[in-house]
Image (tube, helix red, strand yellow):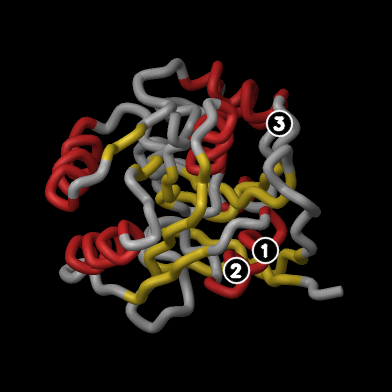
Amino acid sequence: MDILKAFVSWSGGKDSTLACYRAMMNGIEVVYLVNMLSEDGIYSRSHGIGSELLKAQAEAIGIPIIQKKTTWESYEDEFKNTIMQLKKDGVSAGVFGDIDLQEHREWVERVCRETGIEAILPLWNEEREKLLREFINSGFKAIVCSTNASFLGSEWLGRKVDSDLIRDLKTSGNIDLCGERGEYHTFVYDGPIFKSPVKFFAGKWIQRDKKLFLEICNAKS
């Protein structure tokens, strides 16, 4: 039986990481991480993580990362073009970390259908706290790298993803525990899919519109 080769739609955060881990545990060969960048190529479009830090993260994992600059208007075309290139390398599936946003799922499935690959959503419709605890108990390590200031303030930036974070999120009002509505995003720096931890240091935080971002820099040895 042929091994399924796939890419992971990659943000550098906990959901795409856990989706990647589950796919690998199910025998899927993850051969690429695909990450869409801002138009200037400096930051990831999804989480605002620096492109160089994401390269260091991919190197620590040992899976090549493909990064594409895009505007929101050209996002879909760039994503499709990337998939078509990966198909030439034998990639026949894409792995996505969406949990329950139906609009996202419909977009993912349509794009994959139109490019002739299979869409795999390993986390779909699973209970939030269960996913977070699986992430933690599997040995992954991550910090909060951005928040939506309408929900969570700057004091959350840099916090570790652990049981204390789950406890505090549960008492913080109408917050999705996994941040599925964009309440917060994370950067994963170690865990069972990593060959070595990402060396980094956190700097100041900045605000762009209603989003708060922690500046995280790669600390090269």
Classify mark 3: helix, strand or loop: loop
Q: Cβ–Cβ below 8 Å for labels 3 and 1?
A: no
Q: Tell me the quarter of the image containing the C terminus.
A: bottom right
Q: Which residue type does callout 1 highlight? A: Glu
Of marks 2 and 3, the one in the foreground: 2
- How far apart in space, not on screen, are marks 3 and 1 (Cα)? 24 Å
Q: Which residue type does callout 2 highlight? A: Lys
Q: At 72% across and 71% down in the image, what residue appears? A: 218
Residue 107 in picture, x, y percent from top left:
18, 44
- How far apart in space, not on screen, are marks 2 and 3 (Cα)? 25 Å
Q: Which mark is residue 55?
A: 2
Q: Quadrant of residue 118?
A: top left
Q: Which residue is mark 1?
A: 59
Q: At 16% across and 43% down in the image, what residue appears? A: 113
Label 2 neighbourhood size at 10 Å, few (<14), some (14-19), many (20+)?
A: some
On the picture, is 205 further left or further right than 195?
left
Q: Which residue is mark 3?
A: 162
Vertical placement of residue 130 versus 14, above or below = above
On the picture, is 49 further left or further right than 108?
right
Q: Residue furthest bottom?
A: 40
Q: How many marks?
A: 3
Q: Quadrant of residue 165?
A: top right
Q: Cβ–Cβ below 8 Å for labels 2 and 1?
A: yes
Q: Cβ–Cβ below 8 Å for labels 2 and 3?
A: no
Residue 125 in picture, x, y percent from top left:
35, 19
Label 3 neighbourhood size at 10 Å, few (<14), some (14-19), many (20+)?
A: some
Residue 32 in picture, x, y percent from top left:
49, 56
Of callouts 3 and 1, which one flags the residue occurring earlier in the amino acid sequence?
A: 1
